[in-house]
Amino acid sequence: GLTNLVFVGLATDACISASAREARDLGFAAWVVADACATFDRRSVDGGPLPAALVHEVELGILSSAGGHIHSACDVLRHEFDGARVRS
């Protein structure tokens, strides 16, 4: 059966994060492909700008600390096609 789910797309801090967390709750290993995800500029609670790159990096850090596996597209493809084990 399936054990790993791979997540790519928009937006890192919304759909990707929610889906990866739900996958972990259901017992799957959630692999987020950092360079195949992105987000948008956001506003802080006081209205200040939060650049998309910062929001993306912060969310990847949060997901990683919550047990998500953050990888590059190259690492995921290498694992899939070379049979190499991606380090978590």
Image (cartoon, helix red, strand yellow):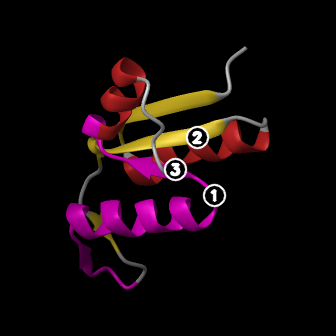
Q: Amino acid at mark 3?
A: His
- Crowding at dot 2, Cα within 10 Å, few <14 / some 14-19 / many 20+, comes out as many
* Circle 3 Cα neighbour tier, 10 Å, few/some/many (<14 / 14–19 / ≥20): many
In the image: residue 84, left or right of residue 69:
left
Residue 82 is one of the magenta-drawn residues? no
Measured Cα–Cα span from mark 2 to mark 1: 8 Å
Q: On residue 69, which mark appears?
A: 3
Residue 56 % position (x, y): 32, 60
Task: Give the image quarter of residue 47.
Answer: bottom left
Whole-number angstrom distance, CA of label 3 to CA of label 1:
7 Å
Name the N-terminal-most of marks 2 and 1.
2
Q: Kindly state the secondary structure of the residue where label 1 is placed.
A: loop
Where disc 3 sits, the SS reads strand
Labelled disc at residue 67: 1
Q: Which residues are magenta?
A: 46-74
Q: Of residues 35 and 72, which is closer to you in this image?
A: 72
Q: Quadrant of residue 84?
A: top left
Q: Earlier in the sequence, mark 2 or mark 3?
A: 2
For the point 48% across and 37% down, the residue is: 85
Say if mark 2 contacts mark 3, CB within 8 Å.
yes
Q: Position of residue 73 (x, y in %)?
A: 28, 36
Q: Secondary structure at mark 2?
A: strand
Does 45 sit above or below residue 20?
below
| Residue type of the residue flagged with mark 2 | Ala
